Amino acid sequence: MRLTIFWERMAEHFGEAYADSFARDHVMAELGGRTVNQALAAGWDAKSVWRGVCVAMDVPADKR
């Protein structure tokens, strides 16, 4: 998954303004105790991060 697609999905699910805040502030066990931004900066691929977000936030299957 390209990073641009990842951010589009984040904006679609959370709304554009909240997606940025969520990525900065919400720590998830699914990302090893990291935020989205920290996981991406640590080298996690966008698809793995998106999967972690989906599990943590119960994103509907049709949006995954």
Image: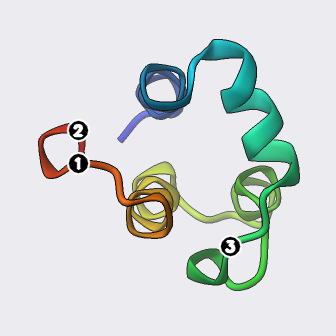
Which residue is depicted at the point 42% across and 29% down?
9
Front in this rendered view, residue 43 or 18? 18
Which residue is depicted at the point 52% across and 59% down?
49
Relative side of 25 to 43, left or right? right
Q: Position of residue 39 (x, y in %)?
A: 72, 64
Give residue 15's quadrant in the image: top right
Which residue is depicted at the point 43% across and 21% down?
12
| Furthest-right residue in this view | 25
| CA–CA distance in space, label 2 to label 1 | 5 Å
Question: Dot 1: what SS?
Answer: loop
Which residue is depicted at the point 47% across and 34% down?
6
Front in this rendered view, residue 10 or 15? 15
Count neighbours of disc 2 (C-alpha within 10 A) and say few if under 14, some if 14 to 19, many if 20 or more: few
Count neighbours of disc 3 (C-alpha within 10 A) and say few if under 14, some if 14 to 19, many if 20 or more: some
Q: Position of residue 61 (x, y in %)?
A: 15, 51
Q: Amino acid at mark 2?
A: Lys
The residue wearing badge 2 is 63
Q: Amino acid at mark 1?
A: Pro
Q: Position of residue 37 (x, y in %)?
A: 78, 50
Q: Tell me if residue 59 comes above or below residue 3 in the rendering.
A: below
Relative side of 42 to 56, left or right? right
The residue wearing badge 1 is 60
- CB of mark 2 within 8 Å of CB of mark 1? yes
Nearer mark to the viewer, of 1 and 3: 1
Q: Position of residue 53 (x, y in %)?
A: 50, 58
Marking on residue 28: 3
